[in-house]
Image (spheres, grey):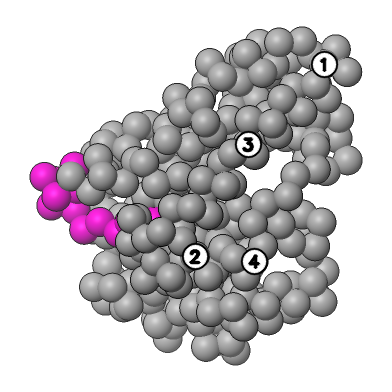
Amino acid sequence: MHLLNADLHCHSTVSDGWLDPADVVRRAQANGVELLALTDHDELSGLDVAARTAAELGVGFVPGVEISVSFANDSVHIVGLAIDPCAPAIVTGLQQLRAGREARAQRIAAALAEVGIQGALEGAHQFARNPALVSRAHFARHLVASGIMPDVKTVFDHYLVRGKPGFVEHTWASLEDAVGWIVAAGGVAVLAHPARYRLSAAGMTQLLDRFVAAGGDAIEVVSGAHSEDEMRRFATVARQRGLLASRASDFHGEQESPTDLGRCKPLPPDLMPVWSRFI
């Protein structure tokens, strides 16, 4: 089971990925992925196409989502795996989250205009195949295409993270709501890329405590965003907390993602893979 090439967190053009859902699956199959989860941000509409393509290509498929959560004056992400995409709680909850995204995008554009970057909203929309889900990544791609910054990471560092001129406050789902929607949809809640969060040791402990208390079951130990040291750190967390371990590239596109689909490190052999729950 540990040798299974599972990639349980990636994105398509339905949110902020570069490939459409069918092409995500095709790339995964070409890279030897045996079990794939498409986990677009706060959106389920790519799952049907991805599932059909996976069935045609003989790739195991897990319906998923990545839910935006407000925590400790910042945002964290909870991945839901093996969810029922028609479950009323998750459908309604995600509709509410998406409703606030356009207003957020307008505020980001206004903030960028204040520092001399005009037309950012229109530019971001050119990169967003789903007009209901304009993200910071779409603004970043516009700024790169406009020649203002050399790459997406530099745009985030200079404009789109807390304390920078294009950052705007936004309230996402609560941790308890996000995990609750996933559980109500029959899924497994996974704490995504935990090393990315700028939390103190006490803050991470609080996040893990609340996540587990809400019904969270798993943590991304292996992530495209994690260094070797970070993987070891969160493998220890999984052991200490009795959490299932997930493996994921968090692939958005070859232009931006350091790890391609199916090319993650293997999980430590003593950890229980999260896919043991649904295969």
Residue for badge 2: 181
Q: Does residue 205 show up magenta in the picture?
A: no
Residue for badge 1: 113
At mark 1, the secondary structure is: helix
Give the residue displayed 62% in from the left and 13% down from the top. 122
Whichever of callouts 4 and 2 sits on the residue coming sooner in the sequence is 4
Whichever of callouts 3 and 1 sits on the residue coming sooner in the sequence is 3
The kind of residue tagged 1 is Ala
Q: Is residue 248 visible?
A: no
Alpha carbon distance from label 3 to label 1: 18 Å
Whichever of callouts 3 and 2 sits on the residue coming sooner in the sequence is 3
Residue for badge 3: 101
Q: 232 or 59: which is nearer to us?
A: 59
What span is in magenta? 53-64
Crowding at label 1, few (<14), some or many (≥20) Cα neighbours within 10 Å? some
Alpha carbon distance from label 3 to label 2: 19 Å
The kind of residue tagged 3 is Arg
- For discs 1 and 4, the disc positioned in front in the rendered view: 4
Crowding at label 3, few (<14), some or many (≥20) Cα neighbours within 10 Å? some
Crowding at label 4, few (<14), some or many (≥20) Cα neighbours within 10 Å? many
How far across and how far down the image is residue 265, in percent? 43, 62
The kind of residue tagged 2 is Trp
Give the residue displayed 64% in from the left and 39% down from the top. 100
